[in-house]
């Protein structure tokens, strides 16, 4: 299957797909598909969204359009993309086409919209039985936000979901490091407080992670007492090359987000303190060269008073919780 941007020249193919699954339109609008639905999908957008910030993507299997996705760039804010619709051809449902289409959308966003680090969407209650489970399986979580939804005779509620993407600052590059192997470096200046990376991946238990760690390298962080995020191994994402330093220029803003601890100059290696994100038995000989180097980094470094004072609240939440209860 391949992904392609759609235009008004594809209106007939889009209309055929919409009409192949009339139940979706009926659940959302209360009516069967209309003859102008495809054209509306291809051109309509919120007033605040520029024309070039809307794209309709088609997923093709040979000559057949099997899925269509309505996507907005920078809506409702500059680092968020909004999925207005993902619809699978009625004759191809139940064959994981929706999952494949969503994976292609993530790749499209990562390759073309480098500033987007969150995807967001709304599920209308009248369609929730079909849609909510699907989006949960793609990694989306309910935000708790809900808005009244009305379309002619359909009165319902639209509930918002979002997913944080695996994301690295556009100024990050991978180069040989004096600390260890390859590392991340700033190709441009990065201001203090800027989000530099956001981690995402497979969620595993401590027992599962212990088994994975028998076959390094494994790029992982702890997000709760028995929950860990393991980054993709192939291809290894750029942000996985971040090295440890005992005097890092990044620290944690939340469970999966690293931000600049201070201004980062062009050419400077971008580092974090592994001790602030490791909640399992772990030991690493450190060669960071910092005047604050502690020689060995361990999974118990969250207990060290000098580190608690240095980093304040900038630990992953699971380790902050341990500090508060120790």
Image (tube, helix red, strand yellow):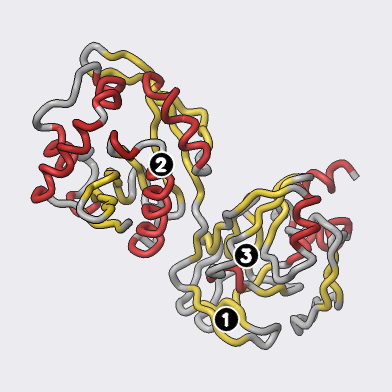
In the picture of the structure, the residue carrying the numbered disc 3 is 261
The quarter holding residue 304 reads: bottom right
What is the CA distance from the residue labelled 2 to the residue labelled 3? 46 Å
**What residue does disc 1 label?**
268
Is 141 rendered above or below residue 145?
Answer: below
Neighbours of disc 2 within 10 Å: few (<14), some (14-19), many (20+): few
Q: x and y percent of residue 314 in the render?
A: 69, 55
Residue 255 picture location, percent across and down: 65, 50
Disc number lying in front (2 or 3):
2
The N terminus appears in which quarter of the rendering?
bottom left
> What label does residue 95 carry, if any?
2
**Which numbered disc flags the more N-terminal residue, 2 or 3?**
2
Q: Give the image location of residue 99, x and y in percent.
A: 43, 45
Above or below residue 223? Residue 152 is: above
Q: Are marks 1 and 3 in contact (CB under 8 Å)?
A: no
Nearest to the eye among marks 1 and 2: give it. 2
């Amino acid at each position: 299957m391949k992904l392609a941007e759609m235009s008004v020249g594809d209106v007939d193919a889009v209309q055929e797909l919409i009409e192949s699954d009339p139940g979706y339109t009926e659940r959302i609008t209360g009516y069967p598909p209309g003859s102008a639905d495809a054209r509306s999908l291809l051109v309509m957008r919120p007033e605040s969204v520029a024309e070039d910030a809307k794209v309709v993507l088609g997923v093709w299997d040979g000559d057949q359009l099997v899925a269509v996705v309505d996507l907005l760039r920078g809506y409702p804010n500059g680092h968020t993309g909004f999925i207005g619709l993902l619809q699978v051809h009625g004759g191809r449902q139940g064959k994981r086409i929706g999952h494949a289409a969503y994976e292609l959308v993530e790749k499209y966003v990562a390759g073309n919209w480098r500033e987007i680090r969150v995807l967001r969407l709304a599920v209308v209650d009248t369609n929730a039985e079909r849609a909510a489970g699907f989006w949960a399986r793609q990694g989306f979580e309910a935000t708790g936000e809900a808005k009244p939804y009305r379309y002619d005779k359909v009165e319902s509620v639209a509930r918002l979901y979002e997913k944080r993407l695996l994301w690295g600052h556009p100024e990050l590059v991978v180069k040989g490091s004096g600390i260890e192997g390859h590392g991340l470096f700033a190709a441009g200046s990065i201001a203090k407080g800027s989000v530099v990376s956001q981690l995402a991946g497979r969620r595993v238990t401590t027992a599962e992670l212990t088994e994975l760690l028998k076959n390094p390298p494994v790029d992982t962080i702890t997000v709760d007492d028995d929950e860990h995020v393991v980054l993709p191994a192939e291809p290894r994402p750029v942000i996985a090359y971040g090295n440890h330093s005992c005097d890092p220029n990044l620290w944690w803003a939340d469970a999966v987000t690293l931000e600049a601890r201070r201004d980062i100059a062009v050419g400077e290696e971008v580092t974090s303190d592994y001790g602030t994100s490791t909640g399992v038995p772990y030991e690493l000989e450190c060669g960071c060269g910092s005047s604050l180097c502690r020689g060995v980094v361990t999974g118990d470094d969250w207990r060290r008073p000098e580190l608690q004072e240095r980093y304040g609240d900038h630990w992953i939440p699971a380790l902050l919780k341990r500090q508060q209860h120790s």
